[in-house]
Amino acid sequence: MATMADVARSAGVSVATVSHVLNNTRPVLPRTRQAVLDAIDELGYTPNTLARSLVTSRTRSIGLAVSAISNPYFTEILQGVEAGALAHGYGLLIADPHDDPEHERKVVQLLHERRVDGMIIAPSADPRMLLAYLRRHQVPAVFLDRLVEDPTDTGPGFDQVCAENTAPMTRLVTHLAELGHRRIALVAGLPGLSTTAERITGYRQGLDAADLAYDEHLVAHGDSASEGAARATAALLSLPAPPTALVTGNNAMTIGALRTLRDRGLSVPGDIALCCFDDFAWADLFSPRLTAIAQPSREIGAEGVRVLLERLAEPDRPGRTVRLPCAFVHRSSCGCPEGAPAPPDEGPGPTADPTAAPASEPAVPGNPLSALPPSPAATPATPATPAPEVPGAPERNVP
C-alpha cells in the first residue's frame, strides 16, 4: 500500500507539501499541486483518516442534522453544505432529527460520538435539550435556517445562518394589497420556529403598511407541512368572510393549500390570489405560475460550512448571526397578467434585487388547479432573470 512518503518521492516534493495538498492547510503552486495529485492517482494512495485523526484530534468530518430532508428546500441546503465541505476537504455525516426535540438530542449525540469536528443543525421548535448537550460537551455548532434564542448563554455562543424572513413576507403582503385585496390570509408554519414568528411579523407589517387591520382569524397554522396547510386553508375558506388572497409560509404548505383550493373547485387567481414563501424548481409549472419569495438555500448551506470552519479556527470568539437576502420572483398567481413587470421595491422588502421578472412563456389555459405536478426533483429553485425596474401593474378591484 502506497504511503505519503511514496507520493512525495514520486512527485519530487516533501511530505509536508503532500500534506498541505491533501488538507488544504497552505497554498501550493498549481504545478506542484498537480504533480502531487498525479502521483496520488498513479500510486493509488488513500489517506489514512483514522490514523490522522488520532494524531490531530480532528476527523475532518462535519455532522449535519436537518429535518425533512425530502423537502426540496432542505435538500438544496444539504447540497450547499456538501459542496462547501468537500471544497475544504471535509466529509459529511447526515442525520434527520424529525423536528422532535428528544430525537434531535439523540441524533446529535450519535454524530458527536462519531467524533465529527463540528455540527450544522436546523433546530427544532424546542431546542432546549439540544442546547444543553452542545454546551455541556462544548461541541462547535452552527444553526441553519432557524434561529435560537438562549438567554442563559454566557459563553462563546453559537453561530447562526439564515435568510431574511420579515421584509420579504412584508413585500408579498403589500403587493397583494396594492392589487386591491383587503382580506389577505396567511398559512403560517410550525409555532415555536423563528421562521414562523418572523414571517408572521412580516405579514403584520405588510398589513400595517397597507393600512389594513390585523384579523387573527385570517392566520392559520399549517405546521410547516402539506397536510397541516390543507386543513388550515380549509378553515380559512370556511370563514363567514373568506380571504380573497392567500400567502403560504413555505413550499410544503403551498402544495397543501393548492390541494384544498383544487378540492373546493377554486381557481387561482380568478377566485383567490396566491403567493408563497419559498420558490422551488417546478413553481412555474403550475398554471398560473406561482409568485414567490426565493431563498438562497444552497448559499445558506455553503455559508454554514464557512462559518463553522471559522468557529473551529477561533473557538472562543462571540457567536454571530449571518442573514442572506431573498429574491422576489414575480409570476402571475398573485393576479398580475402573465409577463407583467415586477412592482418596484418601495418600503420594506428583501435586500436582494427586487425586480426579478417572470419568463415569457404563456400560461396553460384551463383550470389551474386541475392537476398537480408529481413529487419535486431535488434541484434548486432558480429565480427569474432580473428585468429593468418599471412601474408596477395597475391595481385590481377585489370585492
Image (cartoon, rainbow, N blue to C red):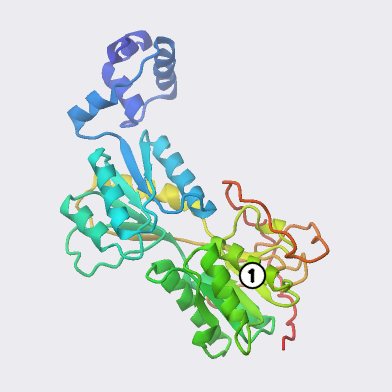
| Residue occupying the point 39% across, 10% down | 43
Q: Is residue 357 left or right of residue 99?
A: right
Q: Is residue 38 above or below residue 136?
A: above
User: Which quadrant would the N terminus be assigned to in this image?
Assistant: top left
Question: Residue 283: x and y, percent?
Answer: 65, 58
Query: Callout 1: helix, strand or loop?
Result: helix
Q: What residue type is labelled 1?
A: Thr
Would you identify the image quadrant in which residue 19 lies? top left
Question: Residue 66: x and y, percent?
Answer: 40, 51
Mark 1 = which residue?
Answer: 260
Foreground pick, 309 / 27 = 309
Q: In this view, does 58 lie above or below 292?
A: above
Question: Residue 55: x and y, percent?
Answer: 18, 27
| Residue occupying the point 45% across, 77% down | 201
Q: In this view, does 302 lie to the left or right of 395?
A: left
| Residue occupying the point 38% across, 43% down | 94
Q: In this view, does 175 lie to the left or right of 320?
A: right
